[in-house]
Amino acid sequence: MVTSGSTVLAIGTKKGLWLATSPDRVGWTLSPPHFLNQEVASVALDTRAGRTRLLAGIRSEHWGPTVARSDDLGATWSDSEHGAVRFGADDGAVLERVWQLHPDTEDRPGRVWAGCEPISLWRSDDGGEHFELVRGLWDHPHRSDWGAGYGGPAAHTVVPHPTDDDELHVAMSSGGVYRSTDGGTSWRARNTGISAYFLPGPEPEFGQCVHKVARDAVAPTRLYAQNHHGVYRSDDDGDTWVSIADGLPTDFGFVMLAHPRRSGTIWVVPLQSDGERVPPGGRLAVHRGDDAGGTWTRQESGLPEGFYNAVLRDAATVDAGDPVGVYLGSRAGDVYASADEGRTFALVADHLPDVLSVRAAVLP
């Protein structure tokens, strides 16, 4: 029985959504699949305002993409008529995929952000039932020059400011990091110091293939980024970035996680290279920094050897438990959980389809 205080782990895959529940983050019960044979590229567990809403960015080969929602942990699902995310007739675009669903802060309980393909940002003020296109980013003069990452042109990261209602960052592949300080009306590229080695000439203003961005829990002007080769920190709200890759086995990967309460603690999952998207030496491991990336500790207890699959950008997450839980899902269909901030991991599920998105929450 799922009760208050239980942990729910939502696992989105290439062929459906699974829910794992646990009273102690040690023993897990796995649900049957939801949306079987439909891609679930994004999930969110929204526990604001004392209730739990599950959001899923699904994509049916027949019906197309939309955002489905459940207020009873998947017992029933609903979808907005004509789809929750829908371009207008004059926008010249059709929604391909919902890459990111991000509930905003506790102080903004109805607001949910969606990052989508084609590269676009959407805002909901009714808990994810209806989304409006953020026209300031859609109409940006750089948009025609934004490229497509290996998985497609994706606005995959939304990072709201914890106290400033008007500020947020978006990261995209490929285009880099952009920041708005007026609620999304205008946007400026913020990529100084981030490599774009695959482009000719000096470092450009935009065009970087940033894979994931996270904000420090205590110092809101500090951001962390995993790039397409490169791991970075910004101490000035993204204005400039410096490398923090020293001490890591490689600087390629997709994951960037930040501790929800403690400043300076982050996790990455290194992969060999963009040409060999497997863990170095075939040994899956996370690397944890407790000093904002100054030094790194390898954490691999309970994770597999002889492992030649990747952990994608949103197939990793942390919860708000004490100690914090760390979760990884792989393209091999395995999901691992740590209840001690990454020191030891245990298998939650295996033989699932490719894991695309993982989110965890403690039920109110």
Image: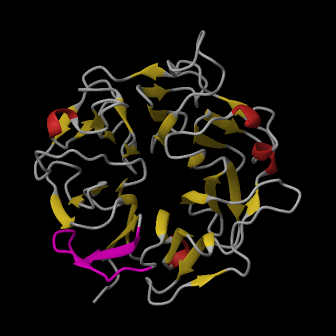
In this rendering, position of residue 44 left or right of residue 296: right
Q: Name the residue rendered at 67%, 35% in the picture.
A: 146
* Quadrant housing residue 60: bottom right
* Position of residue 171 measured from the top left corner of the image (x, y, whole percent): 58, 40
* Position of residue 191 measured from the top left corner of the image (x, y, whole percent): 59, 25
* Position of residue 42 measured from the top left corner of the image (x, y, whole percent): 49, 61
Rendered-image quadrant of the N terminus: bottom left
Q: Name the residue rendered at 24%, 60% in the picture.
A: 334
Nearer to the camera, 196 or 160: 196
**What segment carries the magenta color?**
15-34
18 in magenta: yes
Nearer to the camera, 101 or 36: 36
* Quadrant housing residue 12: bottom left
Rendered-image quadrant of the C terminus: bottom left
Nearer to the camera, 252 or 186: 252
- Look at the picture and state if 192 lies above or below 341: above
* Position of residue 168 measured from the top left corner of the image (x, y, whole percent): 64, 44
Q: Name the residue rendered at 26%, 47% in the picture.
A: 309
Name the residue at the top extreme.
201
- Look at the picture and state if 297 lies above or below 120: above
344 in magenta: no
